[in-house]
């Protein structure tokens, strides 16, 4: 992000290299391309400029070169060493909040497990896809900063990912510090401030997942935990989204 907003001659190339290196461990950093492409172009209609092509080329060349040793040493089975395999393994070993809640709901009402799985994938895809679409549209309109876009995308990925251990929440803290604004101003409730407050709230409540002893880690207690964390956050984000949509119709909304 620092190189993406820098005016140094080779900053775009280094941005692409760093995103490529991060992608070698996890696939999610590729989403950063949506935020940094055209980040220094002042035009509202042109989101690509000449130096963005050097960013893209540097990123994908880094990924290809990084996987060459795995390609030769694994006899062509690159997927076994790819970030995709770790994502699948994490989801199976430590299911996330959406998977757990829907699975428990399906078991309680005797709903077909395959149907529950399809619904889970649809909801997870809707959360990431909806957030991604919102970020792209607001970036094109120049109503969203890179830092705020990164905070929203990081949160959406964490919600969709496997179980969020408290140390994962540290990925949110730098962007919260950069984006935080007062929740209430002279113009009323700040949608940006409320959204950031909800995500910041999670960094405190996620430690509740460390139940003191094993007998407290029951299904009921996990549901209480999900309600106290994700339930409260969901309500807050729905309020912020609804207020933002209402203000957009009145022509005075900005999520910058």
Image: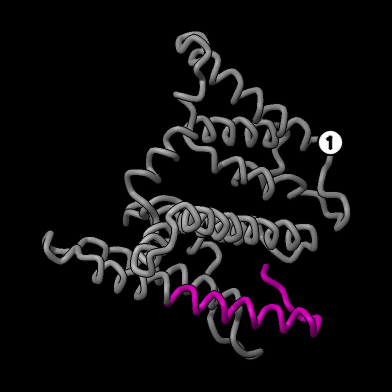
Few, some or many residues within 10 Å of mark 1 (<14, 14–19, 20+): few
Q: Position of residue 153 (x, y in %)?
A: 57, 56
Image coords of residue 124 (percent x, y): 53, 56
Quadrant in the rendering for residue 143: bottom right
- Residue 137: within the magenta? no
221 or 108, nearer to the observer: 108
Location of the C terminus (image quadrant): bottom right
Residue 174 visible in the displayed image: no
Q: Which residues are magenta?
A: 232-256
Q: Is 162 placed left or right of 121 in the picture?
A: left
- Magenta segment, prevailing SS (helix, strand or loop): helix
Decide whether residue 246 is among the magenta residues.
yes
The color scheme shown is one colour
Could you say where residue 19 lies in the image, as x and y percent from the top left?
58, 36
Residue at the spot x=65%, y=61% of the render? 130
Picture layout, residue 125 above or below residue 233: above
Residues 177 and 61: in front is 61
Query: As displayed, is residue 51 above or below residue 150?
Result: above
Residue for badge 1: 50
Query: Would you say 100 lies left or right of 38 here?
Result: left
């Amino acid at each position: 992000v620092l190189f993406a907003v820098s005016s140094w001659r080779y900053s775009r190339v280094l941005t692409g290299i760093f995103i490529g290196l991060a992608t070698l461990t996890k696939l999610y950093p590729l989403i950063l391309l949506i935020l940094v492409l055209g980040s220094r172009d002042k035009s509202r209609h042109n989101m690509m400029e000449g130096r963005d092509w050097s960013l893209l080329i540097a990123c994908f060349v880094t990924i290809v070169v990084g996987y060459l040793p795995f390609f030769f040493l694994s006899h062509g089975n690159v997927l076994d060493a790819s970030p995709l395999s770790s994502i699948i393994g994490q989801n199976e070993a430590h299911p996330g909040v959406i998977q757990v809640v829907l699975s428990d709901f399906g078991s309680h009402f005797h709903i077909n497990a395959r149907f529950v799985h399809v619904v889970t994938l649809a909801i997870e895809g809707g959360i990431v896809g909806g957030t991604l679409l919102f970020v792209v549209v607001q970036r094109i309109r120049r109503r969203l900063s890179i830092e705020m876009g990164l905070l929203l995308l990081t949160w959406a990925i964490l919600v969709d990912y496997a179980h969020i251990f408290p140390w994962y929440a540290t990925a949110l803290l730098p962007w919260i510090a950069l984006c935080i604004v007062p929740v209430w101003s002279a113009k009323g409730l700040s949608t940006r401030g409320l959204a950031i407050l909800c995500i910041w709230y999670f960094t405190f409540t996620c430690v509740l997942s460390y139940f003191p002893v094993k007998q407290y880690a029951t299904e009921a207690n996990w549901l209480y935990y999900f309600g106290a964390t994700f339930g409260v956050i969901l309500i807050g984000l729905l309020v912020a989204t609804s207020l933002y949509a209402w203000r957009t119709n009145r022509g005075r909304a900005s999520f910058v």
